[in-house]
Structure formats: structure tokens, C-alpha cells
Amino acid sequence: MTKEIINNLTRENHFERLKRSFKNALEVLIVSPFISSSVDFFPFDALKKLEKLTLVTTLKPNDLDQYSKVAFFKTLCEFCDVKDIELSILIENSLHGKVYISKYEDETMEAIITSANFTNNGLRLNNEWGTVITDAAQVEELKYGILSRVALEPLQRYHIDNFLSAILQNPIIQSDRTLTSLDLTENIKLKNTPFIPGKNINYWLKPIGVSTDLVPKNKVFDEIDTDLHFSKLKPKGVKEGDILICYAVGHLNIISVYKVKSEVKYTGNENDRWPYFVIGENLTPYYGQSWNQQGITITNQKKQVLEKGEFNVTPSGKNSFGSLMQGADKLRITPEFGQYLIDKIVSIDTVLKAKTIHA
């Protein structure tokens, strides 16, 4: 299979390839830790069909890069206001990859995955290499993976104006041009929910471990991608997109929230105790690092909900976890209870992630 490789050693460098990719796009996503200090280096004016532009970049505390980026943000906002382009600027300080995604009128998409930052040198002069994917499902999955990991709310115009005021009050000290005390992200709020569950999904409680082999309380659950196993009976009803709220057998603490990202698979070994499994995307890895410190169990959460009397915990209305206590490998819960648990776990996860952002 022929793959398109982009490099800066030919006339069709990253700059030219991005111009071609963006030219007829309705939506563009730019993901780059470093960006140019000036919007003018790239011909945004030539993007006549552009309706929506999303920029994901960093704004790291104590870094002089904050000074140049805010000027870029301000100019880009003004340009998009004039051109009536919807603009979203997202800050993700753990970002390292560079991705450029275009979406067109006919719903086709392409993504350029590369080492090149969105700067003049990165797109033209540096030794950078990239490749292109055009499979729409792959591109959508890539886009979701990028946007779902953004913990902070999108920048608003008032944020940028406040940043400019803060910069005026904190000029660069000439004797030390590498660090600054400025932290522009400290007043950006965390998003309430860093992911949006899909339509027509089911919510499940999923035990991890067995009574004879309990999950150690010092074990962390921060892997983004993991296999979640079921018993010898193929799990009915569990499908791609469903939410699995996993808890530890015995002490019943919720350990993390997962989104099913595959069909049900089989190990092929009939002697396996847990031969069926799905691949789960860990939606709350920061919570999963310290689940044992949170004191959130499936039983104390059920008790809190039932005391309020606002909704049922299980679809039958019996609100019992009896089947789980007797060894069942899953239990379907109501969307209301599922979202209640998700909101609580996500809230903790985003706070923990924010601590790493400002660390």
C-alpha cells in the first residue's frame, strides 16, 4: 500500500501540503504545541470555504512562550471575527504531538500526522517528516482522542484580553529570558465533562478481581487502553460505545470509568476463566491513579442516590446489586445513575489532572 510521506526537503513541504489540505476545507483542526508568533506566516485568507477553526496548543506556566502565543490568539480571533469563522482555542499542556485535520463538504476527511509544529521553520525549514491518513473513521477517532483529553474550557475573548493585561503587568525581565512567574492558565476553568457519551448506549457496573484474589489497593488504573474481561458466558448487551464503571471486588471502590471501543472479543482459549473481553478506553486515568484514596464505592453511591429518591439505580427498579454480590460479571444500571457516577468521577479526575497542569 502506497503511503504519502511529507518532508521539508522538496517543494511539496509541510507548508505547501497544509495549504492544499486546508484550501477547500469547511473545518480545520490544528494541533501543535508550538505556534508562530504571527498569524501572517500562513495564508488563512485563502481558505474561502472555512467555517470552523479549532486550535489545540499549550500555554505552560512560567514559560516565555505565553507572551508570543497570546498575541497570536488575539490576532486569530480578530481575523475569524471579520471572516465569520467559528473559532475554538483549546489549551492542553501535556500536548506533544502535531496533527492537522481537514473536513470537507462531502464529509471526507484527512489528517496529517507529523513532527512539524505550526511555525514557519517547522513547516518549511526544519528536518520534519509526516504522513497522511484519509480513512474518515480513523480520522474521527484521532480527532476524538485529541479533543477528549482537553481538560480546560475553551478560551473566550475575555480570557485573551485578561492575558494581555497580565502580560503588561508582568514584563519580561531582561536578565532572565528563560523563565517567568506568569501563569496564564490558572484562571481558566476546568471543563465540567471532558467527554460526551454517545447516543443509545448502556451503562454497566463491572467488577474487577475475584474474592480469592482482590485488587491490591496500591494498584493504579491509569492505562488509557486496556482489556476488560468477562466470564465464559458471552456478555449480552455490551457493545461499542457503552460505559463500564469498574469497581474492585471486595472493597467495592470504583477504580475508573471506561468506554467500550471494540466489539466483544474471544481469547480463543476454552480453558480461560475469563475468555470474553472488550477493549476499554480509560476516560478517567488520573482518578485511576488514586482511586483507593477517594472512598467512592458502588454501595455508598447507591445509598446516596436512593436517599434522595430522584431516580432508580437499576432499570428493574429493584435497585439491588445482588447478582454482582453472587458473582455476576456485570450489571446494567440506569442512565441517570450511570451519569451520576460519571459526573462524580470525572470531577475528581479533572481536578487531579489540573494539578499536573500547574505542577
Image: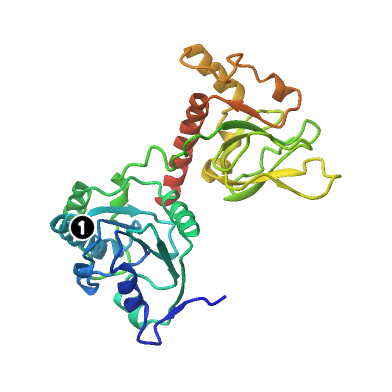
Residue 205, given in percent of the width and then of the height, sits at 62, 30
Where is 276 relative to 211, above or below?
Answer: below
| Camera-side residue of 105 and 221 | 105
Q: Secondary structure at mark 1?
A: loop
Q: Amino acid at mark 1?
A: Asn
| Camera-side residue of 223 and 245 | 245
Asked if residue 64 shows in the view, the reply is no
Residue 224, given in percent of the width and then of the height, sits at 57, 50
Q: Residue at the spot x=60%, y=51% of the render?
A: 225
Decide if residue 151 is on the left or right side of residue 79: right
User: Which quarter of the rendered picture does the N terminus lie within?
Assistant: bottom right
Q: Residue at the spot x=48%, y=27% of the render?
A: 340
Asked if residue 155 shows in the view, the reply is yes
Decide if residue 18 is on the left or right side of residue 256: left
| Camera-side residue of 318 and 33 | 318
For disc 1, the marked residue is 170
Residue 144, given in percent of the width and then of the height, sits at 45, 51
Q: Residue at the spot x=33%, y=62% of the render?
A: 63
Rendered image quadrant of residue 40: bottom left
